[in-house]
Amino acid sequence: MQNPFQNGMTQLDKVAKIKDFGDEFITRLRQPDRDIIISIPVKMDDGSMKIFEGYRVEYNNTLGPYKGGIRYHQDTEINEVKALAFWMTLKCAVAGIPMGGGKGGITVDPKELSKIELERLSRGWVQKLSDVLGPKKDVPAPDVNTTPEIMAWMSDEYTKITGDETGATFTGKPLDKGGSAGRGPATGLGGFYVFDSLRTQIGLPDKCKVVVQGFGNVGSNAAQIFIENGHTIIAISDSKGGVYNENGLDLEKLTEHKKKTGSLADFEGSKNLTNEELLETECDLLIPAAFENQLTNTNADKVRAKAILELANGPITPEADEILFKKSIPVVPDILANSGGVTVSYFEWDQNLKGEHWSEKEVFNKLLPMMNDAAQKTFKKAKEYSTDLRRGAFIVALERIQAKM
């Protein structure tokens, strides 16, 4: 597997070639402020003791407190967390919010733990890191396999340890525990706003045929939002594989089918396909909404989408970027396309600190102009430097960080 942190550094080097930020600034951005590896002892239900490895990378806090999710996955390791923390730093800067970048994780398959074990593990992560977290220091959030309920446990544990009652140290909490309205669909909705803002500029039709990789929170919400806005989802997949119907998929029925059977396969009126085939399906818009390193130098030349919207973090490797650029397939990069999630997380933090609660309508009304602004600034920079949207977004972010630094 490609080291995602190396990919992030390659992206940084490419940007430094087209705009001179000065060596000192780039050198500083090549290392996180700190990376922390912890061991979390958990008493298992059978009475045995198991040690899990956990992480928090605090990458850069020039613009504000470190911000970034916590990922529970069996493949999570320090280089992945470092890469995600680096991208978070840029994402907050592109979105124009006063936060820095961080990321956390635990190497674990949460499906193998009971609910009680999961709660002990989650509280254990906070116990080991409570001294570096805080509303003005480091504000975690959910990521892959972490839920509002897990955030509630963590927030509760933090309050117990520190006495901080604001609830502003963790975002992505349940609504009744200080969470923000609109957080669930925020990443998918923000992605749609960015797409809608750039659609004509990247040469896409009014009504698009869309392929989505990923059926988790982000992928399924995005698919739903695109359908509600008159676009057609012709293929979608989860980790096991996907389904295709050129006339469009009925998402509601598909969700029911997955609940019943445990997978998307064999959905009535559709054709099964592998994740590899899905990425190569002809469409107007391809949305990778799963994991990093999905499009690489081995399959990028087989992509038959007119444009790509990255809702996952780092789904396209630097080599694949070059291939897609040569094929004139615009890529709306992750640090712009999926920044709706962190923007609404920032809104939650802001509400907690002020003791306010905004309606879903208020949240979305604040989100839309921020996403439009970020999208248009990115497009303008890419044009100004005759480069792709990824490098355009990097330049927007790096200029903001450098100005503050």
Image: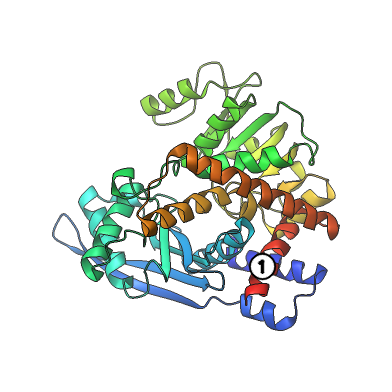
Give percent across and percent down for residue 168: 36, 60
Compared with 53, 288 (above or below) is above
Identify the image quadrant of the N terminus. bottom right
> Given the current orientation, which residue lies at the most extreme bottom position?
24
Image point (25%, 58%), residue name: 156
Left or right position of 379 against 29: right
**Left or right placement of residue 85 versus residue 377 in this view:** left
Label tally: 1
The percent position of residue 37, horizontal first and vertical second, equals 40, 74
Q: Pick whichever, 190 or 323, lies toward us.
A: 190
Locate the C terminus by quadrant.
bottom right
Residue at 54 percent across and 35 percent down: it is: 237
Q: For mark 1, does the 10 Å Cα neighbourhood hold few (<14), some (14 to 19), or many (20 or more) residues? A: some
Residue toward you, 203 or 272? 203
Question: Which residue is at a point 57% across and 22% down the rendered structure image?
Answer: 249
Visual colour scheme = rainbow
Determine which residue is flagged by label 1. 400
Q: Residue furthest top?
A: 269
Q: Secondary structure at mark 1?
A: helix
Residue 100: x, y in percent?
A: 53, 67
What is the residue that sits farthest to the left in this orientation? 47
Q: Is residue 3 visible?
A: no
For residue 256, above or below residue 217: above
Q: Which amino acid, by three-letter code, is at mark 1?
A: Arg
